[in-house]
Image (tube, rainbow, N blue to C red):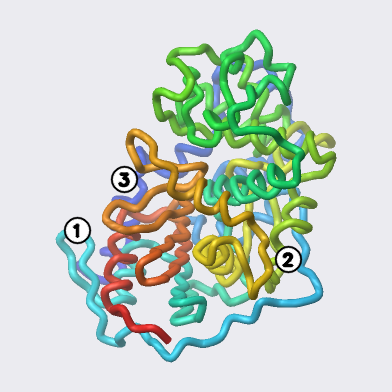
């Protein structure tokens, strides 16, 4: 098989690996939600471009140009930058990576996995930074559901400031408009651990209700994502069953904005981006009805690879940067290690099988992986590739050994 034909085949295989063609998960729906079916104020050509953002023929570009497709809210840098020193460690130039039944060099592996960029840090120092397909150090990549982990960080900070009570507080204490819904007996902890017990199904297949929710709230600008909360039913006792739900993150983000009186972009700027010395501005993609939008809390944050790496390092270092405690150390520990029945999901952070660490994971192959034992952080930005980036992370760790820079 030629290189070109192999790449095309792998792209199609990757699309199917996430439950059907990637672009099929981003189309308009006929689901019976009145707000989603309202006429969109978005020009037809732009609306179609938004709906095609995950088409594997285009996502190589769209996943790093989301601010040209959607309204955004900026997250600003401060007066100092946490400069990343270069590590003397290097990935072996002849590194061979095994993904599934295929072994290949690093460049071919990145091509197979449809990787736009990869960054590796060891002990807080930059080991490797690879940008492909026209990207650069200044490129801001969409993290999609990695955003959930940043909301978790904000939650811990804001709770420590006294704006939020115990994680066992009922959601309706902060969102009384949800009284009488499936969220009546759900706590903040149930949201953070994706155990709300509602009938939510994270399935964006064409024609599904959630396809309509996502399309109406982000692409068409006719409804808020969280409007769907009132449509759900209670199907399990809260806290008993893991059920991945972007809606749960939307509700947590809404609570944070409400109790502080600030937008999530403002909170991200004031509580994380500036205190942690981030290098480049980030941004949140907006969702909601035209003219009344707010940040897409569950999947809308974009930043550079280095700043995503700094976020992983911040958590690896117990929430501190150069002696400055940005995130409460107790929250870092609680949110990334709390024992749960399946031990694969914490407080908007994922576990890593076979690794003493945690991960922020996003649709289409966006990841920040953290390994405590070797103090390794890896950021990877894909454009809808097949599974395999966790295997790549493990082999990167092995290639670097246990050396310290």
Q: Is residue 74 above or below residue 375?
A: above
Q: Secondary structure at mark 2?
A: loop
Residue at 45%, 42% (x, y): give it: 346
Residue 275 disc label: 2
**Horizontal side, residue 240 vs residue 264: left or right:** left
| Front-lying residue, 107 or 190 | 190
* Pointer 1 residue: 100
Residue 251 disc label: none
Residue at 70%, 59% (x, y): give it: 272
Asked whether the viewer can see residue 55, the reply is no
- Which quadrant of the rendered structure holds the C terminus? bottom left
Q: Secondary structure at mark 3?
A: helix
| Front-lying residue, 167 or 365 | 167
Marks 1 and 2 sit apart, C-alpha to C-alpha, by: 41 Å
* Pointer 3 residue: 17
Q: Quadrant of residue 62?
A: bottom right
Q: Characterize the local packing of mark 3: few (<14), some (14-19) or many (20 or more) Cα atoms within 10 angstroms.
A: some
Q: Characterize the local packing of mark 1: few (<14), some (14-19) or many (20 or more) Cα atoms within 10 angstroms.
A: few
């Amino acid at each position: 098989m030629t290189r070109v034909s192999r790449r095309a085949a792998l792209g199609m295989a990757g699309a199917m690996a996430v439950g059907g063609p990637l672009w099929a998960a981003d189309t308009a729906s006929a689901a019976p939600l009145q707000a989603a079916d309202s006429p969109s104020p978005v020009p037809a050509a732009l609306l179609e471009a938004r709906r095609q953002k995950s088409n594997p023929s285009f996502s190589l570009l769209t996943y790093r140009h989301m601010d040209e497709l959607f309204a955004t809210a900026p997250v600003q840098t401060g007066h100092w930058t946490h400069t990343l020193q270069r590590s003397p460690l290097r990935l072996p130039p002849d590194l061979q990576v095994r993904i599934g039944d295929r072994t290949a060099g690093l460049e071919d592996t990145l091509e197979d996995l449809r990787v736009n960029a990869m960054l590796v840090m060891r002990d807080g120092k930059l080991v490797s930074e690879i940008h492909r397909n026209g990207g650069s150090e200044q490129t801001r990549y969409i993290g999609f559901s990695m955003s959930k982990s940043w909301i978790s960080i904000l939650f811990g900070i804001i709770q420590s400031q006294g704006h939020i009570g115990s994680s066992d507080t009922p959601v309706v204490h902060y969102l009384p408009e949800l009284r009488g819904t499936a969220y009546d007996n759900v706590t903040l902890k149930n949201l953070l651990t994706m155990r709300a017990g509602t009938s939510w199904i994270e399935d964006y297949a064409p024609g599904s209700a959630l396809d309509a929710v996502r399309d109406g709230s982000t692409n068409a600008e006719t409804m808020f994502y969280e409007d769907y909360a009132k449509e759900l039913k209670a199907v399990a006792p809260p806290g008993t069953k893991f059920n991945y739900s972007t809606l749960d993150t939307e509700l947590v983000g809404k609570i944070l904005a409400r109790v502080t009186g600030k937008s999530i972009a403002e909170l991200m700027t004031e509580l994380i981006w500036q205190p942690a010395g981030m290098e480049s501005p980030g941004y949140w993609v907006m969702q909601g009805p035209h003219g009344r939008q707010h940040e897409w809390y569950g999947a809308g944050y974009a930043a550079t690879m280095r700043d995503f790496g700094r976020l992983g390092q911040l958590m690896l270092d117990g929430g501190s940067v150069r002696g400055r405690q940005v995130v409460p150390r107790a929250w870092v520990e609680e949110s990334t290690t709390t024992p749960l029945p399946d031990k694969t999901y914490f407080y908007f952070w994922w576990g890593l099988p076979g690794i003493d660490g945690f991960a922020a994971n996003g649709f289409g192959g966006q990841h920040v992986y953290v390994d405590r034992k070797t103090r390794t952080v890896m950021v990877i930005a894909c454009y809808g590739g097949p599974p395999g980036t966790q295997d790549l992370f493990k082999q990167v760790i092995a290639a670097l050994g246990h050396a310290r820079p």
